[in-house]
Image: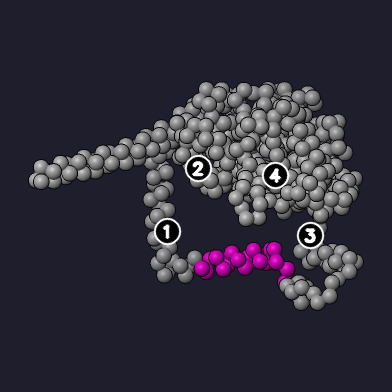
Amino acid sequence: MHLNRILVTRTYETLKSVLFFCVLFKYALKAQRHLRARGIVLSVREFYRWIAQHVITVALRLPAAQRKVRMEMNKAKLDIEDKLVPKGPDVTRHLVLPSEGQSLDWIISEMDKMDKEMNHANNWKQGKISGAVYHGGDDMERVIVAAYSKYCVSNPLHPDVFPAVRKMEAEIVAMTLKLYNKPDGAGTMTSGGTESIIMSVKTHRDWARVVKGITEPEMIIPSSAHAAFDKGAAYLKIKVHTIAVDPYTRKVDIKAMKRAINPNTIMLVGSTVNFPDGNQDDIETLGKLAAKYKIGLHVDSCLGSFVVPFLEKTGLSEGTGGKYKLYPYDFRVPGVTAISCDTHKYGFSPKGTSVIMYRDAELRRYQYYVYPDWAGGVYASPSLSGSRPGALIAGTWAVMQYMGSNGYLESCRSIVTCARTIADTIDSSIPELYILGSPPGPVIAFGSKHPKVNVLEVGDKMSQRGWHLNALTGPAAVHIACTVSAAFFCYALLC
């Protein structure tokens, strides 16, 4: 009896020790991988930030601090309301449904009135705004309206009811895959670049779980990658390793990218072109890494859109003066598994459309959601949304047919020529400023190399002159995403 008790005690102690060392090993392995990916200096900085955040969080719980925060938040709220919310006796607010329905004439009149109340002067038509509105012209607007009107009640969730919309969606994906040199690939439409990116992250996560048994997924992205990757990782519980870009080339550090790869890595990310400064990552080398370690590689071309696929045909892909060269980026690069492309940017389609493409249909399968046991019948959807506006699909299809390859070729030529003209003029005529990297596409960013010139103040001064550009923080810079409208007014910026 006594011997049995001793054996049980020893067994319990042994199991406890084994469990302790298993847990210790697990966290030690995580720490080692984190340290390997980040390096000692960056890890120390991250730890310092973590401590600082916790100290600030505790400090903000003090009554005096909370009063100060409330006061500052109220000030900010009032400032935003003054800028964005019209006030006064002449401002009509519609907060309750009318008893009787209004006429179309009244509705249009009221919309015009709201535009005036909000000081909306359609200044985006002057081309003095960075990106935001990718307008293909008044004729194209009429094409979109006609298509939208014809399919305004359609919903691709019911392809048996709206087979034409299903056909148009498939053709949009096929045409976009052809542009990115994978006609036998697969893809779906989404509501925009953010959803395309999140769908790709979800697809690679589920693929890695089934094929590689990864239950604690991690992905590696450049610091210049779109915030949608971080958003998707937060939604899908994926650890993100953010790798710095070279301060001169603006390309992600490949050696650091490789160092961050571990058995839990599901995918790498590269951009053609990135949002902050319009530069391109080294997709070919990233593709080699992805192929070597048998992981995914997503190329974000949401902003490259329908510009970068036409650069080669315009002769602009080789750049000029040793600058602006476009390097391989699409499915011709081995290792690339997914590409996102926004049709609602330089494809000029109505807002709310994008395409996520995959190298093959087998990978796309992991994007789909199917629930066969629902009381309402089998539920299946290809992306986040259930019901979707078929009118947007029709509008996109109509625009692509209206533009054709030659139309996109000419828009690419004018937009990229505009961007490079601005960049070259800054380089040659404004010694206090410099262009970040060597952007091959429609986006350029400039920073200050003079200690007395604050580039963000330059952006503010331009705003006062009617130009609405984007301020950047890493490093401090200002960028412009050139559009068709901007191309017409390119030289107005230089005067």
Residue with the mark numbered 1? 57
- Camera-side residue of 318 and 22: 22
The residue mark sitting in front, 3 or 1, is 1
Q: Residue at coordinates 76% horizontally, 73% vertically from top-left?
A: 97
Q: Are marks 2 and 1 in contact (CB under 8 Å)?
A: no
In this rendering, position of residue 301 left or right of residue 311: left
Residue with the mark numbered 2? 238
The percent position of residue 207, horizontal first and vertical second, equals: 55, 35
The residue mark sitting in front, 4 or 1, is 4
Tell me where the magenta segment starts and ends, as one range: 70-88
Q: Residue at coordinates 67% horizontally, 26% vertically from top-left?
A: 331
Q: Earlier in the sequence, mark 2 or mark 3?
A: 3
- Please indicate, yes or no, whether residue 291 appears anywhere in the rendered image: yes
Q: Earlier in the sequence, mark 4 or mark 1?
A: 1
Q: Residue at coordinates 74% horizontally, 27% vertically from top-left?
A: 183
Q: Which mark is residue 120?
A: 3
Q: CA distance from mark 3 to mark 1?
A: 40 Å
The percent position of residue 65, horizontal first and vertical second, equals: 44, 66
The residue mark sitting in front, 2 or 1, is 2
